[in-house]
Amino acid sequence: MSSIPTSEMRSSATKRTGTTGGSADVAEQIDAIRADIEALTSTVARIANRQLSRAQDKMVETARDAEDAFRRNPIAAVAIAAGLGFLFGVFTRR
C-alpha cells in the first residue's frame, strides 16, 4: 500500500475536485442535474410544439394551393388522377 496517510489522500482529492465528497454535495449535484433536465425538457417540448404548428400550417397551405389548382384546371386534375389510378392498378396487380 501507499505510505501516504488516508487523511492526506482525502484532502488531496478534495483539493483536486473542489468537493468534500459528502452526501450533501452529491444530493446538491443531483438536484442541479434534475433542474437542468426539467429545463431542457421544457425547452424541447416548446420547440417541438412550435415546429408541429409550423408543419400543420404548411400542410393546410399546401392543401389549399392544391385545391385552387384543381379548381383552375379540372380537366388536368382528372387526367392526373386517372393516370395515377392506372399506375397504382398496374403496380399492385403484379
Image: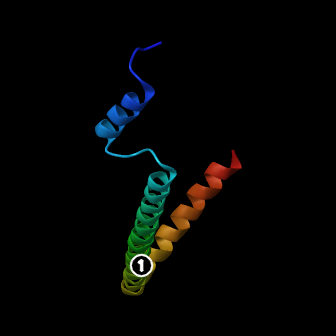
Residue at image coords 55%, 68%: 82
**Left or right of 71, for residue 87:** right
Judging depth in this view, the residue of 28 and 81 nearest the camera is 28
Quarter where residue 42 is shown? bottom left
Judging depth in this view, the residue of 94 and 30 nearest the camera is 30
Q: Residues within 10 Å of mark 1 (few under 14, many from 20)?
A: few
| Total numbered labels | 1
Relative image position of residue 91 (x, y in whole percent): 62, 49
Identify whether 85 is placed above or below 15: below
Quadrant where the image shows the C terminus: top right
- How is colour applied across the structure in the image? rainbow
Judging depth in this view, the residue of 44 and 80 nearest the camera is 44
Q: Amino acid at mark 1?
A: Ser
Residue at image coords 42%, 78%: 53
Relative image position of residue 34 (x, y in whole percent): 48, 62
Relative image position of residue 26 (x, y in whole percent): 47, 52
Residue at image coords 47%, 48%: 22
Residue at image coords 62%, 52%: 90
Question: Helix, strand or loop at disc 1?
Answer: helix
**Left or right of 88, for residue 36:** left
Relative image position of residue 49 (x, y in whole percent): 44, 75
The residue wearing badge 1 is 53
**Left or right of 68, for residue 87:** right
Identify whether 2 is placed above or below 5: above
